[in-house]
Amino acid sequence: MINVMRKIGVPYAEGYEAQSKADLEKQAKEIAANLKKDKLEIPADREIIALIAYLQRLGKDIKVTANN
């Protein structure tokens, strides 16, 4: 998947494929832990965790400049 994203212009670093799964699992565990603080017990491997991660990421890659 990383290779496909790179082909459409996403600037993933070379070799990121090896690190991507660990990053994904870390992010999922952090989201699940935050939900647990709010008394919501959801395993880190559930689709809702992936959806939350996606929604948190929206808009964070857009850089605003003075010309925009």
Image (spheres, grey):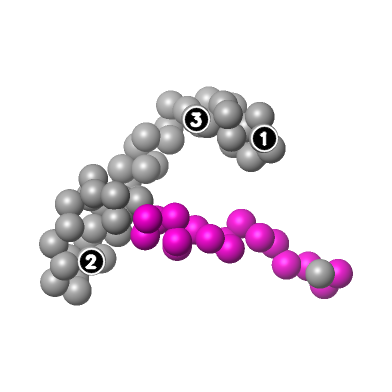
Residue bearing the label numbered 2: 35
Amino acid at pointer 2: Leu
Amino acid at pointer 1: Ile
Residue 68 versus residue 27 in the image, above or below: below
In the rendered image, residue 46, in percent from the top left (x then y), is placed at 24, 49
Is label 1 in contact with label 3 (beta carbons under 8 Å)?
no
Based on the picture, tell me whether residue 54 belongs to the magenta stretch. Answer: yes
**Mark 2 residue crowding within 10 angstroms, few (<14) / some (14–19) / many (20+):** some
In the rendered image, residue 66, in percent from the top left (x then y), is placed at 82, 72
Q: What element carries label 1?
A: loop
The residues bearing labels 1 and 3 have C-alpha atoms spaced at a distance of 11 Å
Residue 43 visible in this rendered orientation of the protein? yes
For the residue pair 33 and 3, the one nearer the viewer reads as: 3
Amino acid at pointer 3: Met
Residue 13 visible in this rendered orientation of the protein? no
The residues bearing labels 1 and 2 have C-alpha atoms spaced at a distance of 33 Å
For the residue pair 7 and 64, the one nearer the viewer reads as: 7
Using the image, tell me which numbered label, if any, was put on residue 1: 3
Residue 55 versus residue 8 in the image, above or below: below
Q: Is mark 2 on a helix, strand or loop?
A: helix
Using the image, tell me which numbered label, if any, was put on residue 31: none
Image: magenta residue range = 51-67
